[in-house]
Image: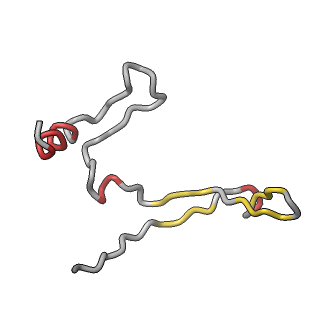
Amino acid sequence: PTRASFISHLRQVSDYDAEGILPTPLDFTHFGTTAALPKTDCYYYLQLKAGKYVSTNGGKPWCGKLYLLATPKG
């Protein structure tokens, strides 16, 4: 298949679970578009202190809204 054909058909898959192996199905309907990105995202950060990794933010994740940045053309 061509790249365009592969992506077009992939975007029709909304419930791929690898024959039950995945804990939740994957949805490819917005593959390769900004609509596939979550509205917010969370991460845990660690800091190295006195030779040990220490969780930041009291062990809670840092969460925030995702913003799309324009990329320069040229």
Q: Nearer the viewer, residue 2 or 26?
A: 2
State the residue at coordinates (41%, 70%): 67
Dividing the picture into quadrants, the one containing residue 10 is top left
The answer to whether residue 39 is above or below residue 11 is below
- The image quarter in which residue 34 lies: bottom left
Q: Quadrant of the C terminus?
A: bottom left
Residue at left 70%, top 56%?
60
Query: Can you say whether 34 is above or below 1 in the image?
Result: below
Q: List x then y, in percent, for residue 19.
A: 37, 19
What is the count of numbered marks? 0
Residue 45 screen position, x and y as percent = 67, 60
Quadrant containing the N terminus is top left
Give the answer, above or below, for where 25 lies relative to 42: above
Residue closest to the eye, 53 or 62? 53
Residue 4 in the figure: left or right of residue 63 = left
Q: Where does residue 37 sit, x and y in percent of width and height?
A: 37, 56
Side of 43 where 47 appears, left or right:
right
Give the colour scheme shown. Answer: secondary structure
Residue drawn 36% across the image and 70% down it = 68
Residue shown at 72%/59% (left/top)?
46
**Nearest the eye: 21 or 74:** 74
Left or right? Give the position of 8 relative to 70. left
The quarter of the displayed image where residue 62 is located: bottom right
Q: Position of residue 9 (x, y in %)?
A: 16, 37
Name the residue furthest right: 50
Residue that lies at the very extreme toward the top in this rendered image: 19
